[in-house]
Image (spheres, helix red, strand yellow):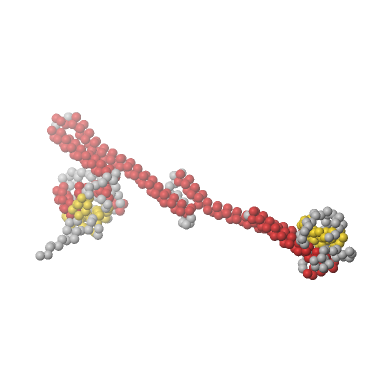
Amino acid sequence: MAVSVGATFGALQDWRGDQSDEVLEAAALRLRGHLAARPGEPLAIPAAGPLTAVWAAAAERADVPSFFQIRTPDGRVRETAGFGAAPGLPRVLPPPSGGGPRGGVLSRTPGWLLHTSRLPDGLLIVGMRTAGADELISRTAVVAATSAAAALLAVTLLSWHAVRRGLRPLAAIADTAAAIGGGDLSRRVPEAGPRTEVGRLGAALNAMLGQIESAFGERRRAEARLRRFVADASHELRTPVAAIRGYAELFRRGAASRPDDLARAMARIEAEARRMGSLVEELLLLARLDQGLPLLSEPVDLTALAAEAVDDARVLGPAHLVYLETAPGGPVVVRGDADRLRQVVANLLANVRHHTPEGTEARVRVSRDGGQAVIEVADDGPGLDEERAARVFERFYRADPSRARTAPAGGAARPEGSGLGLAIVAAVTEAHGGAAEIDTAPGKGTTLRIRLPAPPPAPPSRAPLP
């Protein structure tokens, strides 16, 4: 901007100088013409008398400078004419150049621009006052410089404000990063304009922070589940191990000499070992499912599988009434692991045996719902409240009091479940791409339902035309 102002000032100076030079040269030429006796004759200076008439004649013809003077060759002033005070000229002036009517030299004194040309018997000096023009140019330069400085200051302030405003979101990002570094993963970058680079950066950071928070939350939940799982597994394994150790201690103290005690001790050791083995197998299955290990994928007829499970349940729990209901339209087929799906249905029926009183009716339904295969096990037992129903698929959870473990008529308590049956149901169903659901209320029974993705049924084949 300073260069622009300087260039403008220089251009004005040059333009003013060129204009003044032309005016002075033209005025000198006109005055020299008036001093000539006739056009084309040598210049002649009047012997006496003021040159006011000559000046006036020149002034009538065209604009003229404000001063002219005739001097003798040795520098003495012979005549002066003009408007206003004459400039204080030095005695010796730069010698004018010769040749031609425009011959002369330009020079400057404070406030004046002079043109000196040679006469036959002296010098002609034509002057123009420049103080006004110089002041005008100086004022113009001052105004231009002041305006430029003000504009520069305004641009600087606006730029500073714009930069500060543009960097404000970056400061917020830095504060958010510091808070996150301190452990507050819930902090987010304030939203900015989505069309700005800072706004897009903030949106990308918020998306990344959301994923990081979700990942850390999932890790904490996984760690909590692992700790709970280890604690529950240790507790569940401690019971059969303690029983086996107790019966072994009984054998060491002399039960071997008493056949009845020995048989009872061996039977209990076998039962607890079987229970412990079953628990370990269930834990290993859940561990494999947690690792995402692939299951078999083969066509499985859920209708036939449910019929087999119902037959087994009638043998294992004759005190419960179990029925099978199938939907019309033929068998319901899915792709999956037949053994694992068989275990799912068996666990659903085992849940009825373990947590409902004798005489409870249970109905197993196999149907198709759109693109899903549905297996339901509905009982008319005591049901569950909402709080317990929300946790039935958790590992090692037992909804004890309302799902009564009523002893059979013989008086011996039924064996408790491990608390992993429905957890295995949910895990196996999810591994097949499905979902496990529960529908229950106190006094209204319980319906456990699994949904599995199923291909559409094949169209019925047509007999060939005769």
Residue at the bottom extreme of this rendering:
60
Left/right of residue 155 with respect to residue 228 in the rendered view: right
Which one is in front, 212 or 64?
64
Residue at the right extreme of this rendering:
48
Image quadrant in which the C terminus is located = bottom left
Left/right of residue 81 with respect to residue 233 in the rendered view: right
Asked if 298 appears above or below 68 in the picture, the reply is above
Residue 265 appears in the rendering: yes
Please give the name of the residue rendered at 14% of the width and 32% of the height, measured from the top-left corner. Answer: 258
Could you tell me residue 168's position as x and y percent? 52, 52
Please give the name of the residue rendered at 60% of the width and 55% of the height, measured from the top-left corner. Answer: 155
Please give the name of the residue rendered at 31% of the width and 40% of the height, measured from the top-left corner. Answer: 231
Count the labels in the image.
0
Which one is in front, 217 or 115?
115
Q: Which image quadrant is residue 331 in?
A: bottom left
Residue 140 appears in the rendering: no
Could you tell me residue 336's position as x and y percent? 22, 50
Could you tell me residue 64's position as x and y percent? 78, 65
Asked if 78 appears above or below 241 in the picture, the reply is below
Left/right of residue 224 with respect to residue 338 in the rendered view: right
Could you tell me residue 343's position as x and y percent? 21, 48
Image quadrant in which the N terminus is located = bottom right
Which one is in front, 288 or 268?
288
Q: Which image quadrant is residue 451 in?
A: bottom left
Q: Which image quadrant is residue 329 in?
A: bottom left
Please give the name of the residue rendered at 20% of the width and 58% of the height, measured from the top-left corner. Answer: 457
Left/right of residue 419 with respect to residue 109 in the rendered view: left
Which one is in front, 250 or 191?
191
